Amino acid sequence: MTDAEAARAELLRLRASIDNVDAALIFMLAERFRATQQVGHLKAEHEMPASDPRREEQQVARLRALAEEAHLDPEFAEKWFNFVVAEVIRHHTEAAEGR
């Protein structure tokens, strides 16, 4: 096998691994949103606010620590979390409006 062929084989192997991780992330996000949807319905039923700043602050700290442990940029982890939480809050607000 030439160096170019070996590099191509390694590239395909790495991309297959990336594709598997991407698929797992999508399914995990779907599971997360199923759980947060239930939280949204519960909050709407009991007229609780869509957002919980104290919980969000705790989660940011926890995820930043996990990111550091995993050698992932904590800033990136926080940005990801904030993006997801914004969508969750939108869902919770819609659930409250639809009650």
Image (tube, rainbow, N blue to C red):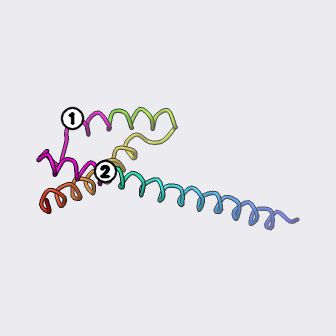
Q: Which element is circle 2 on?
A: helix
- For badge 2, the amino acid type reads Thr
Crowd tier of the residue under label 1, counting other residues whose Cα lies within 10 Å: few below 14, some 14–19, many 20 or above: few
What label does residue 36 carry, if any? 2
Crowd tier of the residue under label 2, counting other residues whose Cα lies within 10 Å: few below 14, some 14–19, many 20 or above: some
> Which residue bears the numbered disc 1?
54
* Residue 20: image location, x then y, percent: 60, 59
**Of label 2 and label 1, which has the lower sequence position?**
2
> Would residue 39 be counted in the magenta stretch?
yes
- For badge 1, the amino acid type reads Arg
The residue at 14%/56% (across/down) is 96
Q: Quadrant of residue 93?
A: bottom left
Compared to residue 5, the image places residue 37 above or below, namely above
* Residue 40: image location, x then y, percent: 23, 51
Q: Quadrant of the N terminus?
A: bottom right
Compared to residue 76, the image places residue 68 above or below, namely above
Q: In which quarter of the image is the C terminus?
A: bottom left
> Would residue 40 be counted in the magenta stretch?
yes
Q: Quadrant of residue 74?
A: top left
Segment colored magenta: 36-59
Left or right of residue 44, residue 11 in this image: right
Left or right of residue 93, residue 14 in this image: right
Q: Which of 12 and 63 is in front in this view?
A: 63
Please identify the dominant SS of the magenta region.
helix
